[in-house]
Amino acid sequence: MKARRNKKQVPSFRKLLKTSKVKLENKLKNKQFKQQSTLKKYRKEQRKLRQAVKDAVSKKPIPLEDPKKKRPGKRIEREEEEEEEALPLDMMDEDDLQLMKDLGQRASFLTRDLSSSEPVHARKRKHEHVIDKYEKIPRTLQTAPEKELIHLLPIKDKSGIIPQTREKPVIDNNQDEEDQEEMEPEEEIIEEPIKELTLEEHLIERKKKLQEKKMRIAALASAILSDPESNIKKLKELRSMLMEQDPDVAVTVRKLVIVSLMELFKDITPSYKIRPLTEAEKSTKIRKETQKLREFEEGLVSQYKFYLENLEQIVKDWKQRKLKKSNVVSLKAYKGLAEVAVKSLCELLVALPHFNFHNNIIVLIVPLMNDMSKLISEMCCEAVKKLFKQDKLGQASLGVIKVISGFVKGRNYEVRPEMLKTFLCLRIKEVEVKKDTEDINKQKKFMTFKEKRKTLSRMQRKWKKAEEKLERELREAEASESTEKKLKLHTETLNIVFVTYFRILKKAQRSPLLPAVLEGLAKFAHLINVEFFDDLLVVLHSLIESGDLSYQESLHCVQTAFHVLSGQGDVLNIDPMKFYTHLYKTLFKLHAGATNEGVEIVLQCLDVMLTKRRKQVSQQRALAFVKRLCTLALHVLPNSSIGILATNRTLMHTFPKTDLLFDNESQGSGVFLPELDEPEYCNAQNTALWELHALRRHYHPIVQRFAAHLIAGAPSEGSEALKPELSRRSPAELFEAYSMAAMTFNPPVESSNSKRKDKVLQGDSFLSEEISQLIKRHCSEVATQSPLDFTKYLEASVRLPTEAKLEVSDQRRMLPSGLD
C-alpha cells in the first residue's frame, strides 16, 4: 500500500476563481488577526523580560543573612574555604563569571533557611529606618555611557524565569534610543507641535504634492507602455497608489490612478483570452522568449484581477456608506470615486469583451443599471447598448442578456424600464426568419470511400483526397466565425429575451416595463415561433380593451400585432380588423403640441398595416384612412404634417382608386359619417379632400409643396412632382428631418434683401429736398444780436380776433330776417 500523503493539495487556478470572495476575505482577515495577536504577545513577553533585566541591573539587593546571625567568624572561614574549592577565575569565561556574579546577588529559593517560617525580609524591616523609596536607589553619576545588553535565551527553574544577558562592546547611543522606542511602543515621545499653515500655504502645498504624484503616475505609465513585457511589475507599483493615504490629495490621486490603469489595460491587453497553464506545460522546457511572454501574461492577468477587485470594493464602500478606519476619504468623496470606478468598468466592458473576467464585469455592471443614481444608471445602460451594437458574434451579448434576465426576475420585475430598452440594440435583425440550423448553413458533405470507388478512378481518388484534406485545414484555419455558430448564439439570446417579455406580459401587465416589452416585441416579432401567434394576438387585444394602457402603449400593441402578422404570420388566415378599428378611432388622440412622440409610431403602424398588407386591405378602409389623415394634418406640428402627407402620397400610389376623393360628385349611396369609428362603414367615398386646399396656405413651405403635389394627383413627373430629396425619403425620415425639437425652423427663413445693398440710408435721405435745403440755409446763417421785441407779435395776436368778430357781425346783417 502506498503511504498516505499528508501534504495539503495546492488548489488549481480554476478552483481559486470559483472560491467565493467572502471566503477569501474571511481567510485574509483571520490570518492578519492571528499574526497581530502573535506579534502582540511576543512584544509583551519581550517587554517583561527587558524590564526584569533592567531592574536586576539597576537595583542590587543585599544577600540574605542567616536568621540567627551567630558565629560570624566561622561563617567567614566557611566562605573562604568555599572560594578555595571553587574553580580558579582564570579558567572561567568572562560571560560565565558575570553571570555567576549576577546570580550571587539574587535571592532565590536555595538561599533561604527552611527552618524559619518568617518572611525573608521580616527581620530586616524591623531594623530599617523609615526611608523613602527613592532613597533606596543608589545615586550614581553616569560618567560613561551604559553598555548595551544582548538578551540571551532565559533559564527557567522552580522560582521562575531567570533572564540571561550579555554586554555588547560597541557603543551606539542612537541605536540604543531606537531600541528603547521598540521596547516601549506604548510610551510615545511627545511630538513637537505641527506648524499651522494658512489656507493659501495649504493650497500651494497641496498643488505641489499633486504635481509630484502626477509626474510619478506619468513616469510609471510611460514605462509600462514603452515595454510592457519588461515593465509589467510596475503595474503593481502603480496599483499600490490606489491606497494613497495623504488626506490632502488622496481622492484626486486615486481617481487619476483608476483612469490611468484603465487606459493602460486597454492598450497592453492582447486580443485573446489568457488561459492558465497546465501542469504538463509548466514542466516542459521552453525558450527565454516564451518564458518572458508567459510571465508577462501571468502578471497581466493577476494585476487585472486585483484592479477589478479594487474597483468593486470602491463601489461597495460607496453603496454601503462604509467609512474606513484610516478616515482618509470622506463619505462625500466616495461618490466621486465610485463614479470614476463605474466609468472605468463600463469602458473595460466595451473595450475588452474577449479578455479574462469579462463575465465578472457584467455581474458588477448589471445591478448598477438599476441604481438610484441617475448618472450611474445611464452610464451603465449606455455601455451595455454600445456593447450590443458592436458585438458581431453575439457571445458577449448572450452573457449580458442572461444576467439581466435573472436580475429582472429576482427583483420581481420592479426595475427601471431602461434595462429592457437596451434589448432593442441587439444585432439580431440580420436573421430574417428563424429556421433550422441545417437549412441555413449546410455543411459540405465529402464523398464516402464507396462513392469514390464507383465514380472516380484511382488517380482521381488520390487528387480528391488531397483536395478534401486541404479544404478541412482551410476551414479550421479560417479566422471568421461561421454562420452556424452565430445563429446558435442569436437563437439562444432571443429565447431568453422572449421568455423575459412573456413573463412580464403574463405576470406584470400594469408594470412600467410594459412599453419597453411591447416595443421589443414589435422589433423581434418576426422571429417568434408561429405556434405562439394566436395566444400573443389575444393577449395584445385584451391589453388594448382593458383601458389600462396609455395611448403610446396601445400604439405599441397595434404595432406588435402587425409585425407578427407581417413576418411568418402571412401563412395564417387572420383578419386583424379590431386593430384597424382601434387605430382609426384613436388617430385624433395624437398630441398636437411639442410632445408629438406618438406620430412616429403611428407612421410605422400605417406602413405595416396598409402598405405592406395592401392585398388584405379593402378600398373602403384605404379611403377612410386617407381622409382621416388629411384631417389630422391640419392640427399637428409641421414635421408631423409632412410625415402624414408623405404617408397619404404612398397610399395614393398603392391604392390608385383613392383619386375618387378629388372628385366633387358623390360616388354611390350614403353620406360620409366622419364621427363613425368603423373605417369600413363611414362612406369615405362620398367626401373630398378639401383639407389640402387649406394646407396649400400653410406657413411651412414643405407642407405647401406636399399639399400642391397631392392636389395634382401625386405625379411622378412634371412641374408638380416632388424633388428627389423629398420623394425618396420615407415618412418617418421626413418626420425626423423636419423636427422642431431644437427650436429651429427647417428650412431656415430667408432674410429680406434690399435691391441696393451698398447704399445705407441715413437721416438726410428720409427728408424731401425743400426741407433739407431749408435746414442747410438756417444752419449756415450767422446768428446776429437783435433786441427782443414781443409787442408787435402781441399786437398782431390781439388784432386778429377783433377783425374776425367784425366780419361775423357783417355776415349776420346780410342774412334775411328769421334765419339768424
Image (tube, rainbow, N blue to C red):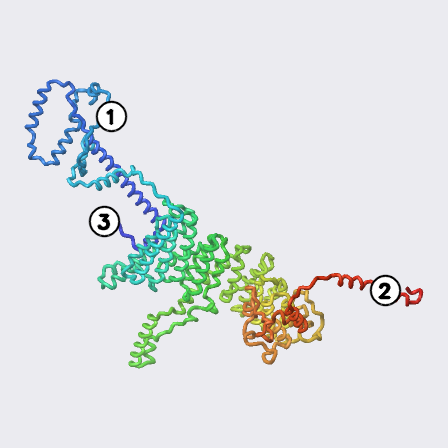
Q: Amino acid at mark 2?
A: Leu
Earlier residue among tags 1 and 2: 1
Q: Amino acid at mark 1?
A: Lys
Q: Secondary structure at mark 1?
A: helix
Residue hosting label 1: 133
Q: Nearer the viewer, residue 575 or 261?
A: 261
Residue at image position (89%, 65%) is 812
In the rendering, at what x and y percent does residue 723 appear?
56, 76
Q: Amino acid at mark 3?
A: Arg
In the rendering, at what x and y percent does residue 19 appear?
34, 51
Q: Nearer the viewer, residue 478 or 443?
A: 478
Residue hosting label 3: 4
Q: Nearer the viewer, mark 1 or mark 3?
A: 1
Q: Quadrant of residue 230?
A: bottom left
Q: Secondary structure at mark 3?
A: loop
Q: Nearer the viewer, mark 1 or mark 2?
A: 2
In the rendering, at what x and y percent does residue 694 appear?
66, 70
Answer above or below: position of 146 versus 284: above
- Residue count near mark 2 (Cα–Cα under 10 Å), binned few <14, some 14–19, many ≥20: few
- The answer to whether one can see residue 321 in this image is yes
Q: Quote the CA–CA distance across marks 1 and 2.
A: 145 Å
Q: Quote the CA–CA distance across marks 2 and 3.
A: 154 Å
The answer to whether residue 583 is left or right of residue 406 is: right
In which quadrant of the rendered image does the C terminus lie? Answer: bottom right
Residue hosting label 2: 806
Residue at image position (52%, 60%) is 516
How many marks do you count on the picture?
3
Q: Nearer the viewer, mark 2 or mark 3?
A: 2
- Residue count near mark 3 (Cα–Cα under 10 Å), binned few <14, some 14–19, many ≥20: few
